Image: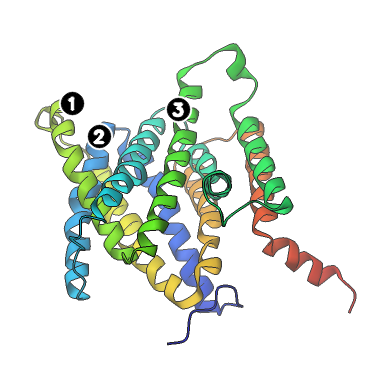
Amino acid sequence: MTPTPTNRHMTAAEWGAILTVATFWGGSYFFVGIAVKELPTLTIVLARYIITAPLFLLICAHQGLRMPWDRQFWPDFLFVGIFNQLVPFCLIAWSQGHIPSAVASILNAVGPLAIALLAHIFTHDEKLNQRRFIGVVLGFTGVVTIIGSAALNSFGVDVLAQLACITATLSYAVSILVARASGRRGAKPLELVTGQIAIAGFLLLPVELIVDQPWTLPMPSNAAILALLGLALLSSALGHMLYFRTLAAVGATNVSLVAYLMPVSAVLLGVVVLGERLELRQIAGMVIIAIGLAVMDGRPLAFLRRITTPA
């Protein structure tokens, strides 16, 4: 079997698939931005798991996959379920009740930078070179720019919400490093996603029943219900399935572009559809983060060199 190229020129259809995944995943901030106006955080998160977990189990069964019951995988499933699902998604959903969805998505765009930094610290084979180090420094400079110097004077709920987004990003990064270890032990990506979503929903259910008491909540509007369905069916289920298919077709290096494009769709939906406003420092921070990601990735710089170098 010929391995998938890790970095090659993509067809228009493959670019379309990557843009679609980025739109679906960026749309999660848009959907949460609608739902959080009417529903508490834990209810939004649990609704996502209740809808997606059975879907992923059915998809696994349809593809002939069986969840690995070997005990070596379940600590990983538990860890990734908590730190790739429960912790970050609860933090992001809560933060969107206090800051625009566009800002939340921009802060979470530093995920690849956080992964690179943690991988440098905790692994032996993924050390930062000079270019990637510069990208990481630029990216986190962008984060500081977004939060702004006002945080030093008044530590309000908006600053706390932004720090919650950053904590969510670090949580994602830690869990991805553990997920990579599970992959090396033989767990397939779809099995890993299904396991972590099922465990996250199982852990969250009793907490949500105690804290939110959903039977006491007013009936949400049609817009909120549609937002929950969009979050579960488009952003989670369809987004992940298309991501795995694209990953198999174009390789990990090319599909990593999704992480860079996702904030673009989230910002556009937040500003154009939800009517959110970005301050100048937030726009400046977004630009600095984008430059940092481009420097760390290397491909945009290589492309610029190709088109500017005389033949």
- Per the model, the C-alpha gap separating discs 1 and 3 is 20 Å
Read off the residue under disc 2: 42
Q: Earlier in the sequence, mark 1 or mark 2?
A: 2
* N-term mark: 1 or 3: 3
CB under 8 Å between discs 1 and 3 = no
- Mark 2, secondary structure of its residue: helix
Foreground: 45 or 123? 123
Mark 3, residue position:
161
Q: Where in the figure is residue 71, as x and y percent of width and height?
A: 20, 55
CA gap, disc 1 and disc 2: 8 Å
Query: In the image, is residue 293 above or below residue 141?
Result: below
Residue at the outermost left position: 215
**Residue 156 in the image, given as x and y percentages of width and height:** 49, 16
Can the viewer see residue 171 in this picture?
Answer: yes
Under circle 3, the secondary element is helix
Asked whether residue 239 is in view, the answer is no
| Picture residue at 18% right of the left edge, 63% below the top | 57
Residue marked by disc 1: 211
The quarter of the displayed image where residue 297 is located: bottom right
Determine whether, in the image, residue 52 is placed left or right of residue 166: left
Which is more toward the observer, 176 or 20?
A: 176
Query: Does residue 136 appear left or right of residue 168 in this picture?
Result: right
Q: How far apart, in angstroms, are the residues tagged by discs 2 and 3? A: 16 Å
Side (left or right) of 243 relative to 280: left
Label 2 crowd bin: few (<14), some (14–19), many (20+), radius 10 Å? many
Taking the spot 89% from the left edge, 79% from the top edge, the residue there is 311
Which residue extends farthest top? Answer: 153
With respect to residue 2, does 100 lie above or below? above
**Label 1 with label 2: CB-CB less than 8 Å:** yes
Q: Which mark is residue 255?
A: none
